[in-house]
Image (tube, grey):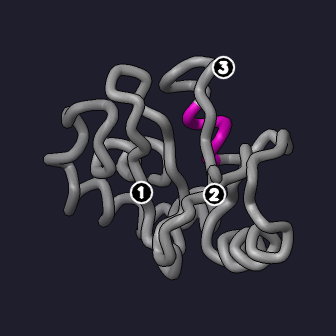
Amino acid sequence: MNNFKYLDGSYGQFNDEEYEGKYYTLTGFSNPEKALMRANQIFGDDVKLYISNRKNKNYMLLNPETNKYIHFGYLFNEDNTYNDDFKKLYTFKKRNQRFKDREPYSSAYLSYHILW
């Protein structure tokens, strides 16, 4: 059983009640549509971004080379897709600049480029 649903609305095997609860919590800290748009800019329109099935993670993305999911983004932390706060963006990018050139399918890279 797959425990995810595409952000584009197509269906996975997420229990509707679980999905709605996680989505509602997620939208208080992140903007899934903006995250999907940024993922499309980096990886192309074929990329699928999912709501993570891990308790404290925002999203997951499939690495096409390894067929493994990379979970990223802490669920209870506002990111730049949600707040558009330049000061928070600047301090995050400065503090985490070592993640800028990491392997593209790593949680650090995905957080740095998609969420911030």
Circle number at residue 3: 2
Residue drawn 54% across and 55% down?
A: 59
Q: Which residues are magenta?
A: 35-39
Sequence-first disc among 3 and 2: 2
Residues at marks 3 and 2, CA–CA distance in whole angstroms = 22 Å
Residue drawn 62% across and 65% down?
A: 30
Label 3 sits on a secondary structure element that is loop
* Comparing labels 1 and 2, the label whose residue is closer to the camera: 2
Q: Nearer the viewer, residue 93 or 56?
A: 56
Residue 100 lies within the magenta run: no
Sequence-first disc among 1 and 2: 2
Callout 2: 10 Å neighbours few (<14), some, many (20+)?
Answer: some
Three-letter amino acid code at disc 3?
A: Asp
Label 2 sits on a secondary structure element that is loop
Please identify the quarter of the rendering in which residue 94 is found: bottom left
Q: Which residue is mark 3?
A: 45
Please identify the quarter of the rendering in which residue 31 is found: bottom right
Residue 23 % position (x, y): 74, 69
Q: Which residue is mark 1?
A: 72
Q: Nearer the viewer, residue 112 or 83?
A: 112
Q: Nearer the viewer, residue 20 or 77?
A: 20
Residues at marks 1 and 2, CA–CA distance in whole angstroms = 16 Å
Instruction: Specify the farthest residue to the front.
Output: 1
